[in-house]
Amino acid sequence: MATVKRSGPGIAALKTEIANLERKRAEVGFFDTSRYPDGTPVAYIATIQEFGSPQNGIPPRSFMRSTIQEQREAWQQTLAQGAKRVLSGRMTTLQMLESFGLSVVGQIKEKIVEITQPALSASTIYNRLNRKDKPKNTSTKPLVDTGIMLSSVDSKVSDK
């Protein structure tokens, strides 16, 4: 008959990692520090793009919600596998959540790049081609005008 030790350094480390798993979370998105050169928060513009602004003629172009919907099951499996690695001592909670967050950032960026519909309006394309205060953009692709929003998707691990 085998006996199970309930104390010792291995058990203490396991208890620490379980506590870390319960109190930490990975956050992914646009944080307060991300701003356009004029001071506009990137999160504000990303929200408009995600949900649209009908009164301003901007249709929704979901890149966050659609990524979540498409990846939810895969993320659950990834996190379950990561938790097993943490509990077996092969990685820390911080390492697992940072890795997961970076993976999600990459998936959201891929979705932003993939989106081509709804197409830009003729006035938006005209404005891109004829603006004077920023470099001209000849692209007709939505969501990647200056690249600031794309490069601002980020992740961090924080306490719940």
Image: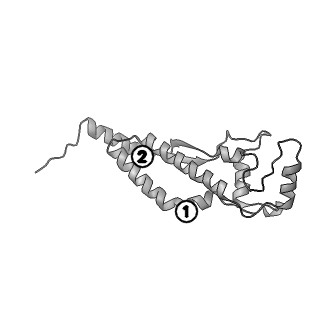
Q: Is residue 64 above or below residue 131?
A: below
Kindly identify the amino acid type of the residue bearing the numbered disc 2: Leu
Q: Secondary structure at mark 2?
A: helix
**Along the viewing direction, whichever of 58 and 2 lies nearer the viewer:** 58
Q: Percent from the top left, x then y, of residue 113?
A: 66, 54
Q: Percent from the top left, x then y, of residue 154?
A: 60, 44
Residue located at (56% from left, 59% from top): 68
Q: Is residue 11 above or below residue 112?
A: above
Kindly identify the amino acid type of the residue bearing the numbered disc 1: Glu
Which residue extends farthest top?
9
Instruction: Give residue 21's mark.
Output: 2
Mark 2 burial class by Cα count in 10 Å: few <14, some 14-19, many 20+: some
Q: In the rendered picture of this protein, how many numbered marks are placed on residues?
A: 2
Q: Percent from the top left, x then y, of residue 101?
A: 52, 47
Whichever of callouts 2 and 1 sits on the residue coming sooner in the sequence is 2
Which residue extends farthest front?
138
Task: For the residues labelled 2 and 1, say whether their Cβ atoms are less than 8 Å apart.
Answer: no
Q: Which residue is mark 1?
A: 70
Q: Percent from the top left, x then y, of residue 94?
A: 45, 40
Residue located at (69% from left, 58% from top): 50
Please identify the quarter of the rendering in which residue 70 is found: bottom right
Instruction: Give residue 43's mark.
Output: none
Side (left or right) of 156 relative to 14: right
Residue located at (43% from left, 57% from top): 77
Q: Secondary structure at mark 1?
A: helix
